[in-house]
Amino acid sequence: MQAVQDPIVPDYVHGLQRITDFAEIEEVMKSPEFQIDGADERFIFLDDTLLMSDGQRHSEQKRLFAPLMSRQALAYYELKLVEPVVRQSIAEHVAKKDAQGVVRLDLVPLIHAALTRISARVTGVDGVDTEERTNRFRKLVLVISAATTASFSRAADPKGMIQQGRDAMQSMIDEFLSASLLRRRALVAQHRAGEIGLEDLPRDMLTTMCLADDLARDDDGEKIPYVWRQCALFLTASIKTTSHALPHVFMHIDEWMRAHPEDQGKQLDPEWLHQAAAESFRLHQSAPVRFRRAVKDLTLSTGRQVARGERLAIHTPIANLSDAVFGPDARYFNPNRTVPDGLKPWGMTFGMGTHACLGQNLVTGMQNKGDEKHGTHGTAVCMLKALYEMGATLDPDHPARRPEGNLHDVWETVPILLHTA
Ligand code: HEM
């Protein structure tokens, strides 16, 4: 079994105070004396969105968007959206099986395509349905995602990446977003006129913004308009993160089964998959570091002094590998791990405090998944289960590979076989 290493961080991070201790990070993430911060490109694409706002603006947005991830909404998404999309995305590949009936495919674009469709619907983007339209939309999201994290790239020209992101944003507005917003505004107008009920409206972020009449900001003329920034947040926050996370789970399960043949077959058990996914989420976070800025001079309980306006580098991926918190084998995948009371099995992977991930339950499912009526498995287990039910294994002839020019802890390609598709 391979030990997980500390992630590599961009050079400029070395000039900041860096926090790696679990408890100290928790103190910062939960403290109202720190605000969300990030590299400049984050503000170009995401300024004043749920992620990049604080204080009252953040609380208002949190209240506005919370119903999108209510128990009832998640049950609805899982049944009406996640399961059909997973089936459709796999079916498109199954059509390409070889003479022996084996399907060869790459897990990375497969997961990415499924997540693109799911996230488009949760965001409120229409027409991300056929393989061709999904690929086009996926490509635009990838360019925007890359632009929002340009300083984490080893690319020679981060400014060029940001410009490409702006161009992709404009294409996405023209090809997908404007029409989607127009349709929702018309539906909300019909609802207000008493012609259709609330339950007939789409259940998504854009509709929520239309219902709240919260679509614009004063500086929209100078920046990417607010409503599109919020779309960029929801799309990049959901697609890239989940698509980065799931190939890791698959790789760890493969490694585990080779070391523990007695567990073969457990990958068909959703309960076991939940544990395996959570453990893998703990070990890998797509962002190597997060940032927070102090709103005033202060001293943390550890004695660390932080000046007003100072930017801290918060190393949640390193904290998640802490022996003191997760045990002496913390750097190794162990689906049977138990974590101390009060901690999540994935540690800090979905954040902590006021900016904790809005979409976590969509990915991990709701706690009481035994509840027949509203229990959910989440996108991770739904996807993995569907793949294992088709006998998914790594392709022994084509090893998985990591990308070269990128500091993110990701797999670039994970070729797999589906034996019983
Ligand atoms: C494996 C998948 C995911 C991981 C690991 C993840 C991780 C995170 C983390 C760490 C944060 C906090 C960032 C910070 O404090 O600096 C966050 C925030 C956020 N996530 Fe996720 N996320 C995932 C999936 C999703 C999905 C599916 C959505 C769908 C809507 C989503 C929407 C958001 C939003 C809107 C925020 C901002 C919340 C706020 O600032 O109040 N995420 N996520």
Image (cartoon, grey):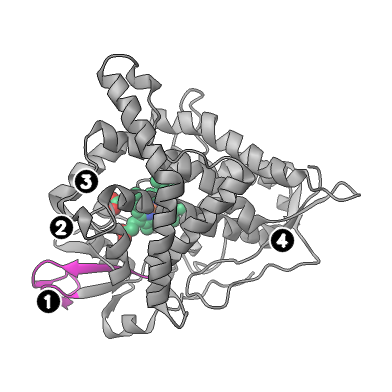
Label 4 CB, ligand 1: below 8 Å?
A: no
Is residue 414 in the magenta section? no
Residue 245 percent coordinates (x, y)? 52, 57
Q: CA distance from mark 1 to mark 3?
A: 34 Å
Give whichever of 238, 387 is nearer the camera.
Answer: 238
Secondary structure of the residue carrying numbered label 2: loop
Q: Residue 298: where, in percent of width, then height?
A: 10, 71
- Counting other residues with Cα less than 10 Å from the Cα at mark 2, is it few (<14), some (14-19), or many (20 or more)? some
Q: What distance separates the C-alpha of mark 4 from that of mark 3? A: 44 Å
Q: Residue at x 63, y 52 (%)?
A: 110
Secondary structure under the numbered disc 1 in the rendered image:
loop
Please, what is the three-letter code of the amino acid marked with disc 3? Ala
Residue tagged by mark 2? 32
- Residue neighbourhood size for the residue with mark 4, other residues' Cα within 10 Å, grouped as few (<14), some (14–19), many (≥20): some
Find residue 415 and name its label: 4
N-terminal of the two: label 4 or label 3?
3
Residue 50 in sight from this viewpoint: yes
Which range of residues does the magenta coloring cover? 285-310
Q: In this view of the protein, which residue sits in the foreground, 275 or 378? A: 378
Where is residue 259, by image quadrant?
A: bottom right
Left-right relation of 358 to 119 = left
Mark 2–mark 1 distance (CA, rounded to whole Å): 15 Å
Q: Is residue 342 visible?
A: no
Camera-side mark, 4 or 3: 3
Give the label on residue 216, or none.
3
Question: Which residue reaches farthest left?
Answer: 297
